[in-house]
Image (tube, rainbow, N blue to C red):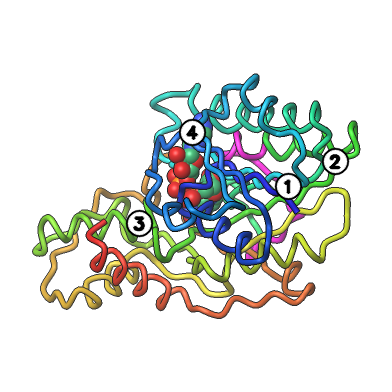
Amino acid sequence: MKAIVTGGAGFLGSHLVDRLLSEGYEVLVIDNLSTSTDKHLRAHFDDEKFKFINMDILDLDGLKREFSGFDLVLHFAANADIRHGLDDTWRDLEQNTIGTYNILEAMRVNDVKKILYASSAAVYGEPQTFPTPEDVALVQTSFYGASKLSGEALIQAFCEGFGFRGWMFRFVSVVGERHPHGVTFDFYHKLKNDPTRLEILGDGTSRKSYMYIDDCIDGIMLAYKNAKDKVNIFNLGWEEYMNVNKVADIITDELGLTDVKYEYTGGSRGWVGDSPLVHLSIEKLKALGWQPKVSSEEGIRRTVRWLRETGD
Ligand SMILES: NC(=O)c1ccc[n+]([C@@H]2O[C@H](COP(=O)([O-])OP(=O)(O)OC[C@H]3O[C@@H](n4cnc5c(N)ncnc54)[C@H](O)[C@@H]3O)[C@@H](O)[C@H]2O)c1
């Protein structure tokens, strides 16, 4: 089997590359290294089953040239930072929605018909139902969420129109080795700069689930192998959730810090579009045999240990 991983130099993408190669796939990574480097891929540079091309997914002609002969695409390249949609209303649309269209169009002209897609829990906006199942009504509260949901919609249209099959994953916050952004990363770096105080966006009560990277990759691969519909949408998360104060407590404890002063920017949301509670139902994927194993707390602790060890 031959797979393309867009965003394969990034956090989730590079873990997927490791898994695919270990399962015998030939893997082509397409990444423009805009929020990453090639360091997580270097271990594979001498592997004849591995190839890396530095390319932007906005380069549709380039994508069309490279996609010939592949069986599936794992589309993980995106602007993954949810917070700045109001500063630049074009970026999420361009990077996430048009980027996804380009991937689908390059697949269509090369007769590649299977796509795995990194969506997000952000597509739920601020839902009324918890834990939130995949089939609730979706009302968008962020440009990022809107762009991810638009990507899902385009995939569905290509499935209907051109015989594609799609697997779409709505992730909660993922933590673990190579973690490059998000609350654990931010808190770690703030505390590294000043171990006496920690600025917390919002009022510390915002609650979210955190999923460990290996559980995330297991879930993606299990869904791909076992879900047989034309369009397959899955939540990937955890049964538990915790508030931001608890995340801060875990990180300060892991760093051995005491008497850190928490300073709040205020409000129940860290930014416009931030949901005060992210807690997804994971029953649909559990019914296929998936069970996350690493608790949110242990996932956060492993992330901090990795950040310390690598100096990232
Ligand atoms: N990490 C999470 O908690 C999380 C949660 C929900 C959804 N997601 C989604 O999962 C995917 C991967 O996220 P991540 O956390 O690994 O982020 P990441 O920033 O580590 O990885 C994204 C990769 O895509 C590449 N990229 C970005 N724009 C590109 C472009 N125009 N052309 C080519 N390459 C480009 C970057 O260089 C990077 O290597 C993203 O689609 C993100 O939206 C992540």
Q: Which residue is mark 2?
A: 164
Please state, as top left, top right, bottom left or bottom right, where the C terminus lies in the image: bottom left
Q: Is residue 63 above or below residue 118?
A: above
Q: Which residue is mark 3?
A: 183
Whole-Å distance between the Cαs marked 1 and 2? 25 Å
Q: Where does the magenta region start and end? A: 130-149
Q: Which residue is mark 4?
A: 54
Residue situated in front as seen by the camera: 216 or 191: 216
SS at mark 4 in the image? strand
Ligand 1 within 8 A of label 4's CB?
A: no
Give the image location of residue 203, x and y in percent.
Answer: 31, 56
Whole-Å distance between the Cαs marked 1 and 3? 27 Å
Q: Tell which tag, 1 or 2, sits nearer the viewer.
A: 2
Whole-Å distance between the Cαs marked 4 and 1? 38 Å
Whole-Å distance between the Cαs marked 2 and 3? 36 Å
Q: Is residue 210 above or below residue 102?
A: below
Residue lying at 64% horizontally and 28% vertically, measured from the top left = 63
Q: Earlier in the sequence, mark 4 or mark 3?
A: 4
Q: Tell which tag, 4 or 1, sits nearer the viewer.
A: 4
Residue type (three-letter) at the residue carrying disc 1: Ala
Residue lying at 9% horizontally and 64% vertically, measured from the top left = 196
